[in-house]
Amino acid sequence: MKLPVFFSFLFSLALASPAAFGHGDEIATDPGVAKDHFTVYGQSDRYELTLYYPELNAGQDAHLILYIADFKTNRPVDKAELKISAAENPQIVFEAKPLSPGVYELHGAFSENNTYTLNVQITHPNGADLIGVAGLEVGKKLPAATETAAAPTEPGNQWLWFLGGLLLGGLGVWFVSRRRNRALTAAFLLASAWFSAPNFNPTFAHGDEEHGPKEGGSGYGKSVYAPKETQFLFEILTQPIAVGDYQSATTMYGTIIPSSGGLGAVVAPQSGRITRVNVTVGQTVRAGQTLAVLQQNIGTSDQVGIAANNAGLAVQIETARARVAATKREFERLKKIEDIAAAKDVQAAEAAYNQALAELQTLESRALGANSAANSRTASLVAPISGVMGAFTLTPGAEVTAGQTLFTVTNLNKVYVEAQVYAQDLPIVRSGNKFLVTASTAGSKTAEVRLISPAQTMNSGNQSQRVLFEMDNPKGEFKIGEFVTVKALNQETSRNITVPNSALTEINGKTAVFLKDGPEMFTLSYVQTGEDDGTRILILKGVEEGEKVVTSGAYEVKMMYLNQ
């Protein structure tokens, strides 16, 4: 065998062997297109309709699912009264049954296989409307799922193909070489190359490529398909983008502290034992209400003093009683001889008797008060302010010491915000601008506050100035010690495009929003942001007025986008 013929044989053998390349786990069908139902849409400036229907045939009962959403907000329209008929045949009337908020099941039957337009008449507090849903095809079949990926070749089949090709190639080359005809050899090589060419497209194994949108148009597209039922499930809401008044803001940080009269403490006036507790933790009390009763503990020295005081009073009382008896006898004697006795003597005796009697009554009252104080020794502990009882562990019989804090009462109807303000922000704080407070925790509670005291003291840790704001807190949403963000809004406004902060998301390190292009289609749009006023953020580039931006459920749309 000549060398050129041998190389020709190897070339033909290489072409005759089947090509097999690695393949990943690709999905054969587009995950954004439903394969178990057809979908048609209809909308107006008030409502948006999405209709799902299976394969339909004339004369058979038809069961269709209709989704009704608010056109601007994408919120499900619940408890709507529907009247539905076919434009091509007004005799076809459908019965609507609500399944869940915004979801209705339609029942009816079509007279013949044709393309229909359903006229949906909606009666709802948001307004009445008549919307046509066109393109409903009766008699159309769902597309059959086709396998586009080639079946993998088994290792045994590869070896059979290789050995068979080797044998046939060898016989052909041997036959041609015996004839020693170069033209015939060339023809054989061309024919073998033609017939051995694989009839499938080679596929290559996936590596660790980065999925998601990329610059230059490569990677995934910027649209994501979200079924209407998924939108309702995840409460994906939208808002039209409009140019409005925007106020720039300066951000400060602060802490909620009690207001004047917002936190009261009850302290034990003396050492003793708690005999009764009248309140519970979390109970609402009023100012002056008795919270507990304290019985005073008296030491030995106090008891000795009380006894000595009582003994002295007893001696004074006996002396006073003897004086009263003596003056009384003298007064009664002079009264008997009043006719012969001098009048001034009778009057002097009467005065002496009355004075002795008054002294006796005074001493008896003093002794009675001392005995009562010594026997009772109790004090009532009352609420200093109206509010809610804080946590305490006192029980009847508990021993307390003088100066010990026993109860705390908190009133959150009005609280203060102590903000840390640096020197460069003081002009904005002093100008009487509007101030908003937002909680630093999840939930983003927001309220308006009033400036009540400019900076009076400095924070030694960071040299910021302490500014006090007052805030009405009737629902008690803000708690003592809670960290908050204070926004000082400038008085000057500008006309710009803004979106709620909840609309922003981040993909590949870039700030983006999702815009709603159709009933079940959303588009990713990278945006350039500006200042933030605490609730809305300025959009400098990336969106236009009139587009609908996702304001609730942006995270769920992002997950669907990344997983498509």
Image (spheres, rainbow, N blue to C red):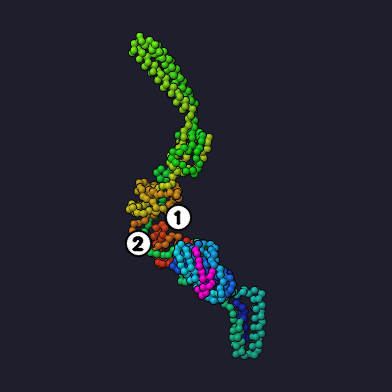
The quadrant the N terminus occupies is bottom right
Counting residues from the start of the chain, the first of labels 2 and 1 encountered is 1
Tell which of 62 and 214 is nearer to you.
Answer: 62
Work out whether residue 260 can be spotted: yes
Mark 1 neighbour class, 10 Å CA radius: few under 14, some 14 to 19, many 20 or more = some
Q: Which residue is mark 1?
A: 444
Q: Dot 2 lies on which element?
A: strand
Q: Is residue 385 above or below residue 431?
A: above
In the rendered picture of this protein, how many numbered marks are placed on residues? 2
Q: Quadrant of residue 205?
A: bottom right
Work out whether residue 73 can be spotted: no
Amino acid carrying label 2: it is Ser
Tell which of 519 and 511 is nearer to you.
Answer: 519
Residue 208, given in percent of the width and then of the height, sits at 54, 67
Amino acid carrying label 1: it is Ser
Residue 284, given in percent of the width and then of the height, sits at 47, 43
Image check: 160 left or right of 81?
right
Q: Work out how far the residue at label 2 is from the one at label 1, CA to CA, in angstroms.
A: 25 Å
Is 89 magenta? The answer is yes
Q: Is residue 49 above or below residue 304?
A: below
Q: Is residue 188 above or below residue 388?
A: below
Q: Which mark is residue 494?
A: 2
Q: Which mark is residue 253?
A: none
Is 462 magenta? The answer is no
Per the rendered image, the range of residues in magenta is 80-94
Q: Residue at x 48, y 25 (%)?
A: 303
Mark 2 neighbour class, 10 Å CA radius: few under 14, some 14 to 19, many 20 or more = few
Q: Residue at x 66, y 85 (%)?
A: 171
Q: Dot 1 lies on which element?
A: loop
Q: Residue at x 41, y 14 (%)?
A: 328
Image check: 10 left or right of 531?
right
